[in-house]
Image: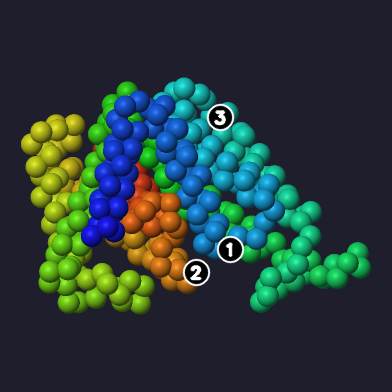
Amino acid sequence: MKNLIQRTLTGIVYVGVIVAAICVHPLLFAAVFGLIAGLLIHELYALMKYDAPVWVRRLEITGGAYLFVASCLFAGDYAGHEIYIPYIIILLVSLISGLYIRHSTPAGEAALPDDSGGGKLPNPVNRWGMMLFGQCYCAGTISLLCFIPYMISQVYDPLPVLMIFIFIWLNDTGAFLIGTWMGKHRLFQRVSPHKSWEGFWGGLFAVVAASLLFACFFEELRWYQWLLFALITAVSATWGDLTESLLKRACGVKDSGKLLPGHGGMLDRFDSALLASPAVYVYFEFVIRN
């Protein structure tokens, strides 16, 4: 009972912060989600046991947060393309730092010969790979949210981004209720043994029904555009959830973190959005705008 209350209260605060950040003002959206992007990278580095000096990790986490903020400022015409130059510099510094990092090679990791006579050097490929994966998976994907509010009109419209999260939440709720009630056939047992096909179709039905209802009240999109929007969000969100489940399984953990009591970590809450964001961006760019 205590865990249920804790989970409920955390969920209410979480939803309230997300909705307020999206709806109140684009700069608040940039600030809150920029912080979230940084926290996602920080959590991912902890999961992967990212072996880099503290200053390098902090620089890269700051870079991920900066990428989101810069994308919001660029999308809203608050700044030009030069806003991305500091982020490019951060990536260059991170890559170049691999030349100067000398520490012990983790067990099982290939080492490079050191011609200076200092023994073995740590192989930088794993560290560079983790850095680039973190920037792409956590910051790059979610930064595409910045452009979606401007794709229906030239001014900031919070509705499309808000609907992404509403569709994700409805999909999760429908999948949980139907999956708990009648789930028998595993959706992807190798990665997530508790998810079922019945739950998947339950979540999809909830999202489709909601999209047709929203089409009656919000005329920014036609009913079939709302329907396709919902389908793309639900399917890509499910893949996002499974992708993070595979990541956690590879890292040998149940939850990505403990930042959100009763809900795990930030990656546990945003895993669906990390794949839904680029999928919806592509849909809006090539279908809605054109």
Q: Which corner quadrant holds the C terminus? A: top left
Q: Which corner quadrant holds the N terminus? A: bottom left
Amino acid found under the numbered disc labelled 2? Cys
Q: Is residue 58 left or right of residue 234?
A: right
Report which residue position mark 2 lands on: 251
| Nearest to the observer: residue 50 or residue 155 | 50
Q: Is residue 86 visible?
A: yes
Q: Residues within 10 Å of mark 3 (few under 14, many from 20)?
A: some
Report which residue position mark 3 lands on: 83
View extreme (front): residue: 2
Report which residue position mark 1 lands on: 49
Residue 64 on image: x %, y %: 53, 43
Circle 1: element type? loop
Answer with mark 3 or mark 2, whichever residue precedes in sequence: 3
- Rendered image: mark on residue 144: none
Single out the mark in the foreground, 3 or 1. 1
Q: Residues within 10 Å of mark 1 (few under 14, many from 20)?
A: few
Is residue 211 positioned above or below 103 on the image?
above
Answer with mark 3 or mark 1, whichever residue precedes in sequence: 1
Q: CA distance from mark 3 to mark 1?
A: 31 Å
Is residue 83 positioned above or below 41 on the image?
above
Q: CA distance from mark 3 to mark 2?
A: 35 Å
Is residue 156 positioned above or below 226 on the image?
above
Amino acid found under the numbered disc labelled 1? Lys
Single out the mark in the foreground, 3 or 2. 2
Contact between marks 3 and 2 (CB within 8 A): the answer is: no
| Residue at 20%, 62% in the rendered image | 176
Answer with mark 2 or mark 1, whichever residue precedes in sequence: 1
